[in-house]
Amino acid sequence: MAFVGWNPGTEKEIFTKDELIAAFSFEKVQKSPAIFNEEKLLWFQKEHVKLLPKEEQELRTKKAIMDEFGSAPTIDKGKLRASSEQLLKCVDFLEKISEEDFSAENAKEALWDYATKEGRGVVLWGVRYSLTGKEKSPDPFTIASVLGKAETLSRLRHASKL
């Protein structure tokens, strides 16, 4: 928020709190009205998250996904794209992963060749949409790893019955 109406006079845009306090001066506050840019705010947020340790990034990602996609979604069959057979085939591939090994990497490995053969845009969209009910979301492998094996399979089976 410091960049709304203020500029440090350099090209640097990412500051720690202490760096920002040290760089801030009222002389560099602009006289013209400040304009809030939500897109820029989201960019700043993403850049600050990148500075966090990997474990903290993963924890925040999981929390964000569960806050947004924690309950079973309402699915519009017209937006699903993947066929029932394709979704059930994905269930078959994902069932082969043990509960303790159910991760984004292993889900991707299990589905990638099949999705490539059938059309990644169709299959992976279908998995993503089945898991979230949203047209835009993180990748389906990350979502599956956060939801866990049982919930992922349950949502895919449910979508395949539509």
Image: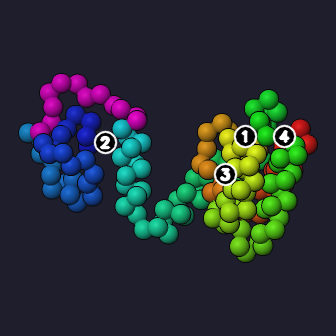
Task: Say what secondary structure mark 2 lies in.
Answer: loop
**Residue beneath disc 1:** 122
Q: Where, by quadrant of the figure, is residue 101 drawn?
A: bottom right
Give the alpha-carbon distance from disc 3 to disc 4, as whole Å: 17 Å
Disc nearest the viewer among 1 and 2: 1
Question: Going 12% across and 42% down the picture, which residue do you hit?
Answer: 9
Question: Going 25% across and 47% down the picture, which residue do you hit?
Answer: 13
Q: Which mark is residue 65?
A: none
Q: Are marks 3 and 4 in contact (CB under 8 Å)?
A: no
Q: Quick check: 38 left or right of 88?
A: left
Residue type indicated by callout 2: Met
Disc nearest the viewer among 1 and 3: 1
Image location of residue 18, percent across then percent down:
22, 60
Disc 4 crowd, CA 10 A, few/some/many (<14, 14-19, 20+): some
Q: Are marks 4 and 1 in contact (CB under 8 Å)?
A: no
Question: Going 35% across and 32% down the picture, which residue do you hit?
Answer: 37
- Compare marks 4 and 1 and give the one earlier in the sequence: 4
Q: Quick check: 136 left or right of 107?
A: left
Residue type indicated by callout 1: Val
Disc nearest the viewer among 3 and 4: 4
- Compare marks 1 and 2 and give the one earlier in the sequence: 2
**Residue beneath disc 4:** 83
Task: Say what secondary structure mark 4 lies in.
Answer: loop
Question: Going 15% across and 36% down the picture, which residue do you hit?
Answer: 29
Q: Which residues are magenta?
A: 28-39
- Compare marks 3 and 2 and give the one earlier in the sequence: 2
Disc 2 crowd, CA 10 A, few/some/many (<14, 14-19, 20+): few
**Residue beneath disc 3:** 140
Looking at this view, is 122 or 162 the one in front? 122
